[in-house]
Image (cartoon, rainbow, N blue to C red):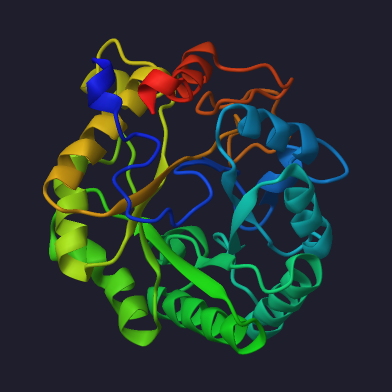
Amino acid sequence: MNVHQHQHQLSLGVRKPVFQSEMIAGFECGLVHGGRHDLLATTRHTPAEQMHPHLRIVVEHGMTTVRDGLVPGHHVTDRLRAARAAGVQGVWDLSHYHRNLDPVRCAKIVAQAALTVSGDERLWLCPVNEPSLYPLLAGMPRHEAIDMAVTMARTARDHHPNVGILTNDPIAGVGDRQFEATDAIVSAIDVDVIGVNYYPHTARTALSKVLIKTWRRYRKPIMVSETSWHDGHPVHHRRHPGFHKGAWLRHILDQIDVARMHGAEIVGVCWYPIIDCPPWHSPRSRHRWSHGLIRSDLSLDPALSAELRRLQLPEAA
């Protein structure tokens, strides 16, 4: 791949940048395994533990926008202050595979805390992560997850003057059915960015085709809101022999180039998760899924680190 091919990988052809950086670091904030596994806690991504060094590492790799979480069990103001101190812009999940028992109160607390910490700076929220998967992973009907997302978005905007809304859902092909949850949210509220979650093991067609279809359906800016490479996943290696994390990132950026040539407006790509996580079903395990940049001991994946640093070089920008 030559330098010219990466000419706009850090500007992605956007008229005016929507986010502080188009390469985005995604910190896993799910409450999974029936709510018994808090991934912010097991990855130690809290202000009292390793949130500060985590943010320092991603900033050093050119990612000054992050997807992160303001979920139950964690102090909203402390997390907002940690992000601000690190100089990063947050896109904050409010519900990530859990049923929020009081969505109005949750969104109100977040909006008011953001005003306290950052004034009326843009507050980016992803109210509900992957509502289509809530029946499977949260025991919650999809329509209730959609309603929860709409309620939290509206409440946040009632209490904060400058809220941006990101949707996200698994969109791995071009069939209409996978767009149903996003359709419902877009029809109910003003959505700013459409999120497409796309992984090697679930992909049904090329990412470029997915992005073009999504763009033509909504005519709104698009974020590749989740993608990554799992070193231990056999399907990843079967579908893409010889790949590693750096190669997958290059592949994703190439696909974004193709979609942009067809008119799609792509405003960011989020590597998710950016930290290696314990298996969802085994929160106390010392084993980590190798899908991130940052390992549990704060060492780095060499292939992904090298590719992210290469993208910061003047000749790649």
Residue located farthest toward the bottom when viewing the structure as drawn: 158
Residue at image location 37% in from the left, 77% down from the top: 185
User: Against 121, is 69 above or below?
Assistant: above
**In which quadrant of the rendered view does residue 191 lie?**
bottom left
Horizontal and vertical percent for residue 33? 59, 51
Residue at image location 65% in from the left, 23% down from the top: 295
- Residue 135 or residue 42, whichever sits in front: 42
Residue at image location 56% in from the left, 37% down from the top: 63
Residue located farthest toward the right when viewing the structure as drawn: 48
The answer to whether residue 60 of the structure is visible from this angle is yes
20 vs 315, left or right, is: right
User: Against 265, is 27 above or below?
Assistant: above
Q: Quadrant where the C terminus lies?
A: top left
Q: In this figure, what is the number of numbered marks?
A: 0
The answer to whether residue 204 of the structure is visible from this angle is no
25 vs 74, left or right, is: left
Residue at image location 57% in from the left, 80% down from the top: 152
Horizontal and vertical percent for residue 1? 23, 15
User: Against 1, is 273 above or below?
Assistant: below
- Residue 138 or residue 255, whichever sits in front: 255
**In which quadrant of the rendered view does residue 310 lie?**
top left
- Residue 172 or residue 118, whichever sits in front: 118
